[in-house]
Image (cartoon, rainbow, N blue to C red):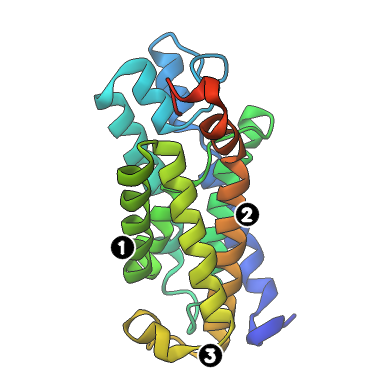
Amino acid sequence: MTGPGGLELDNIALPLLLAFLSGSIPFTWLIGKARGIDLLSAGSGNPGATNLSRELGKFYGALGLILDLLKGAIPVLLTSGRWDQPAPLFMVGAAAVFGHCYSPFLKFRGGKGVATTGGVLLVIEPAIALLLLSGWFIGLKSLRSVGMASVTASVFGICLAAVILAGWPPLLGWLVTAISSDSQTVLGWVLLIVSVLVLIRHRSNIQQYFLPSSKEEKR
């Protein structure tokens, strides 16, 4: 069965499922449980690296961050030689991000998708990953909130996806010159969907940031 852009859907179904399951492994939650803390009920209630860092310290937070990055990077690396075009890899990466955000092992609760998205992009399109990382640092510097830094990076991702989907290669240049037009379209849609997903997952951060009572502690 062939899908849009010539994708062989029969050959991608299993990698998508495995990528979703890989992303679903709640490493940060498991680290917290091993140390006697349930991240679903502690701190912000989010089973992600930021909450883990707040509850157990920077070492465990960094460990959780690395593992969340690998959840996105490893499925893409393992399937990178399976297809002649990069478009399926974008879909595999997106599946890992969705698994991280909606883990069946946590009754479909999960993290907010930032680190896993970063792991995917570092393997597939490191230039885009660096651009979004720049957006994250801009958000952190200007808004002084880790959550809002992720929101800023998501907005960067949405804008970049719009540029890709609009077919404006002069604005992309060094970013996607090696990608075919069909794959650029898939990249644009995947980047848009994942960026919107991450933005939605941070809606509580946006609400908290703009509430006067949240100024003392921005998550």
| Rendered residue at 57%/58% (across/down) | 194
Q: Decide: few, some or many residues near mark 2? Use Cα within 10 Å; few <14, some 14-19, many ≥20.
A: some
Q: Residues within 10 Å of mark 3 (few under 14, many from 20)?
A: some
Which label's residue is closer to the chain start, 2 or 3?
2
The kind of secondary structure element at disc 3 is helix
Work out whether residue 117 or residue 78 is closer to the camera in this orientation and state it.
117
- Which residue position is annotated with label 1? 130
Please name which of the two marks, 1 or 2, marks the residue nearer to the observer. Answer: 1
Q: Residue furthest top?
A: 36
Q: Mark 3 belongs to which amino acid?
A: Ser
Q: Residue at x 48, y 71 (%)?
A: 160
Few, some or many C-alpha atoms within 10 Å of disc 1 (few <14, some 14-19, many ≥20)? some
For the question of whether residue 73 can be seen, the reply is no
x, y percent for residue 121: 40, 62
Residue 19 disc label:
none
- In the rendered structure, which disc, 1 or 2, sits on the residue that comes first in sequence? 2
Relative to 123, does residue 46 appear above or below in the rendering?
A: above
Residue at the spot 46% in from the left edge and 62% down from the top edge: 156
Q: Viewer-proximal residue, 2 or 131? A: 131
Q: Which residue is mark 3?
A: 181
Q: Are marks 1 and 3 in contact (CB under 8 Å)?
A: no
Residue 164 seen: yes
Question: What is the x, y in percent for residue 15?
Answer: 57, 61
| Cα gap from disc 2 to disc 3, whole angstroms | 26 Å
Q: Comparing marks 1 and 3, which lies closer to the viewer?
A: 1
